Amino acid sequence: MTLQDAPPPARPVIRQLDEAAINRIAAGEVVERPASAVKELVENALDAGARRIEVTIAAGGKRLIRVKDDGCGMTPDELPLALARHATSKIDGSDLLAIHSFGFRGEALASLGAVGRLTLTSRAHGFEAAAIRVEGGRLGPVTPAALDRGTVVELRDLFHATPARLKFMRTDRAEGQALAEALRRLAMAEPHVAFTLRDATEGRDREIFRVDAETGDPVAALGRRLAAILGRAFHDNALPVDGTREGLHLTGFAALPTYSRGAGVSQHVFVNGRPVTDRQLTGALRAAYMDFLSRDRFPAAALFVECDPHLVDVNVHPAKSEVRFRDAQAVRGLIVSTIRAALSGAGHRASTTVAQETLSMMRPGPAAERAGDAGGLIDEEDRPERSERGTAPARVYQMDRPSMGAMQVARTGQAPLAQGFGESSFGFETAPPAPAARLPGTETPSARVEPEETPGGESLPLGAARAQLHGNWIVAQTETGMVLVDQHAAHERLVYERLKRQMAETGVAAQALLVPEIVDLGAGAGRLLEAAGELSKLGLSIEAFGPGTVAVRETPAILGRIDAGALLRDILDELEDLDASTALPARLDAILSRVACHGSVRSGRRMRAEEMNALLREMEATPGSGQCNHGRPTYVELQLADIEKLFGRR
């Protein structure tokens, strides 16, 4: 039998799916896990104007999710309509870009009712309370109920109608943690709303998470809410950010580079109050810290982008966790420039956790006890006093009275150092006066140990040098304590910043290739040629050379001999992924960092007092000098009160 004689394949029949199947398919897109259900229900409560939201769960949300709010509520006639697909009060359908609320599709309640047992109880002002039940997509009648105000949504046995979905659920603990994280992110976006999360598994009533409504100034309220959720350490080491560009407004808090993390779990981005997970935004955050962190460290930040709804499309994904901006480059530039300006404004400041970890390691006792409390990130006020057996009161040393210096600091805020820094009150020998010498990369200092205050009365944040230990550590005395400086790391940062300034002023020197290098990039060549103007400013000159091919005419001279093809492919990958590239600037900065490392003062070199003081003064005047080029702290500051605690004087 020939191919022409073969019978035609069976023709599939087009049929209309029933409502239950449609709802279950929609639920698979909207409700991935219990955390998704909580997110949808809490967002509905926020859209209803709630000021207090209580969430109760059991078995990680798989057996029970109950969300109670004090919002505007619904009338009995609106309850059946609220459970219908594509029924919503958020938009009228005339402009799908003018989204001013969290929800707008009208799918959440219908989807939840299709895969679980859902009961909706609500009461609007001026109406009686009513309830309706839906199970597996089948609506029950509207019945009278008892409720003061607002709405209560109770979802039991999630995915009971799709048991195969339950096989892909994680443990109760893992689902509960994901659910709590989703609620925390929403609580960050709404500091003026109170949130409570309770676990009612096996009849218990355990409070997992609670934040009260904040009042007052929005920025201060946001700071207090972030401190309650992310911890006081984040709040104490975060910088407020505020920037505007082309109709976009960025606010929030970004942590100091020395308060970094080993993963991106502390990066929270919000667009018009909506928590989102967007690679372009997190990539911009990473680029803002590029000069301050190594590749294995991640910044901590909570950023809020506000813009006209027509400038961003939130209708990209059913879960509404992704967005698409009309001008993604403007958003990226706003994030990078605003955060860098905030970091520059912080000057030489380093995170307080550096000192806390130092004190934790210096404290007597078992190493496990010293390294506890989240790696020394718990403030001393929060650390309970413990004895060797854990029951008796902590040991009181014989020297239990604070010193006169500590008492004066506590009373007046100034230490009794009137005798001046010129004398070695710590017993260390300072260098004798010598002719002024220029430390590579520093201003020519005076040939004496500087006093605690300049003649004009200006305080010295990093104090004045008192000694050098083991050829690498500078000990400086401040008004209220002491500073320990890593001389090599500090000077490396200073030289690096100077080299960057010089490159910005004079440009990147380009080296012409004797024979242009031809690179075949296929369809991506056009995208790369669009960025040719920006690349030429960095010393990389390219031009078209036939279909899908570019010719490299010049490369940055500081890079020496490079594989131009590999560099162009790296740049193209970033352009296609993030619509921007940091590959070439990162390579240039890496070279400058390497030059700075080799050109800075080496460990083991003995420094004179005027050289050490010159280094301290330039650190105070150089932004970002609180950490080296790899994100490690360049100095540790210990307050006199903390030192007193180490010796049992307080």
Image (cartoon, rainbow, N blue to C red):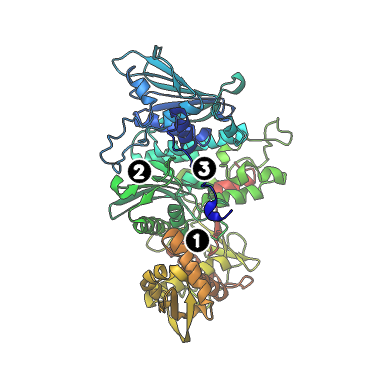
Secondary structure under tag 3 reads loop
Tag 3 residue:
10
Q: Nearer the viewer, residue 137 or 100?
A: 137
Secondary structure under tag 1 reads loop
Q: Amino acid at mark 2?
A: Asn
* In the image, residue 199 above or below residue 318: above
- Give the number of the disc on residue 272: 2
Q: Nearer the viewer, residue 497 or 305?
A: 305
The residue lying at 46 percent from left, 38 percent from top is 13
**Quarter assignment of residue 47:** top left
Q: Nearer the viewer, residue 381 or 465?
A: 381
The residue lying at 43 percent from left, 45 percent from top is 276
Q: Dot 2: within a 10 Å radius of its alpha carbon, few (fewer than 14), some, or many (20 or more) residues?
A: many
Secondary structure under tag 2 reads loop
Q: Position of residue 346 (x, y in %)?
A: 43, 56
> Can residue 302 be spotted in the picture?
yes
Q: Amino acid at mark 3?
A: Ala
Q: Dot 3: within a 10 Å radius of its alpha carbon, few (fewer than 14), some, or many (20 or more) residues?
A: few
The residue lying at 58 percent from left, 43 percent from top is 402
Tag 1 residue:
292
